[in-house]
Image (cartoon, rainbow, N blue to C red):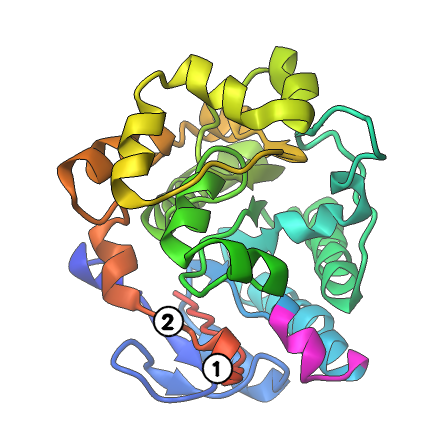
Amino acid sequence: MRSLRAAGRPALGVDIKPSPFTDRVGSISDRAFVEACMAGVRAVVHPATLHKPHVATHDNQAFIDTNVSGTLALLEAAVAAGVEAFVFTSTTSTFGAALTPAPGEPAAWVTEAVVPVPKNIYGVTKVAAESLCELFFRKHRLPVIVLRTSRFFPEADDDAAVRGRYETVNVQANEMLYRRVDVEDVVSAHLVALEKASAIGFGRYIISATTPFTPDDVAALRQNAVDVVRRLFPHCDEIFAARGWRLFPQIDRVYVNALARNELGWRPKYDFGHVLDCARAGVDFRSPLARAIGSKGYHDRVFEEGPYPVG
């Protein structure tokens, strides 16, 4: 909503609570509310969800109500209103257990061809919502693009062991190698998806920072990721040492964004090379948009649905 408004594009922001970027307050599980919001809408961007951290605070039914039933309500209202493009924000968490190689196996090279094996109710409901999106394309010819986004939340890692060993900015710098994306690039992916939806019909894409690794690196990444990074970025040790940062000793998966770049024409701006340039200069490597948004409060136990702009 910030980016659409800044570009002067008409958009209606919908959320369960008021904000400077919320035009109508309500839930996507309220069908009458959704139908009222859909009047005159040409395109829908649907990132509404209960997230992985909500597994600790919400029951299974709440996930189904928001992630599945809410998505169904939006899809049905979109078809009825003659919407021309629908973009659904999914997650790389849908891959679940497929992301964890057995001991001694190479790192997982994760493309859209990897079959999801959800590990929790979050993953299950996001896969179900993706399937609903595909069904509505097949049955109603509603153009839908599914974007499986990797990590872009600003909070500390949800793994207590990782939080204990690395400061947050160090973790997120490392993750830009293989499993993180800047929120500005997430927004740009949604905007290009809106433009390409009618031509593509239905597509599913991984949205993550462009990795410097290749399939030839996956065995070494699982054994000694530091040596791989040093080979690709010879000055990394010096730059990290100046900040008191450390590289991860192992990497277990690599998200590959090639399909999104090739088919959507998406051009992400932020990657590990950018991180090193900023670290060398002593400046924040996050985009201005990421810095402006701030925290969603997952780890101080403030849990919210949304936001879910419709426009």
| Residue 212 image offset from top left, x and y in percent | 46, 21
| Residue 102 x %, y % | 85, 35
Q: Which residues are magenta?
A: 53-60
Residue type for callout 2: Ser
Q: Secondary structure at mark 2?
A: loop
Image quarter where the N terminus lies is bottom left
> How packed is label 2: few (under 14 Cα within 10 Å), some, or many (20 or more)?
some
Amino acid carrying mark 1 in the image: Asp
Q: Are marks 2 and 1 in contact (CB under 8 Å)?
A: yes
Number of numbered callouts drawn: 2
- As for residue 43 lying within the magenta part, the answer is no
- State the residue at coordinates (48%, 27%): 211
**Residue 38 position within the rendered picture, expressed as x and y whole percent measured from the top left:** 48, 73
Q: Tag 1 or tag 2, which sits nearer the N-term?
A: 2
Residue drawn at (68%, 47%) of the image: 137
Q: Determine if residue 83 is in view.
A: yes
Determine the secondary structure under disc 1. Answer: helix
Measured from the top left, where is residue 159 in percent x and y?
62, 61
Query: Left or right: 277 with respect to 80?
Result: left
Give the quarter of the image for residue 109. top right
Mark 1 sits on what residue? 300
Place residue 7 in its image quadrant: bottom left
Which of the 4 image quarters holds residue 276?
top left
174 in relation to 239, above or below: below
Q: Nearer the viewer, mark 2 or mark 1?
A: 1
* Foreground pick, 139 / 206: 206
| Viewport quadrant of the C terminus | bottom left
Which residue corresponds to mark 2? Answer: 295
Q: Residue at x 45, y 40 (%)?
A: 174
Few, some or many residues within 10 Å of mark 1 (<14, 14–19, 20+):
few
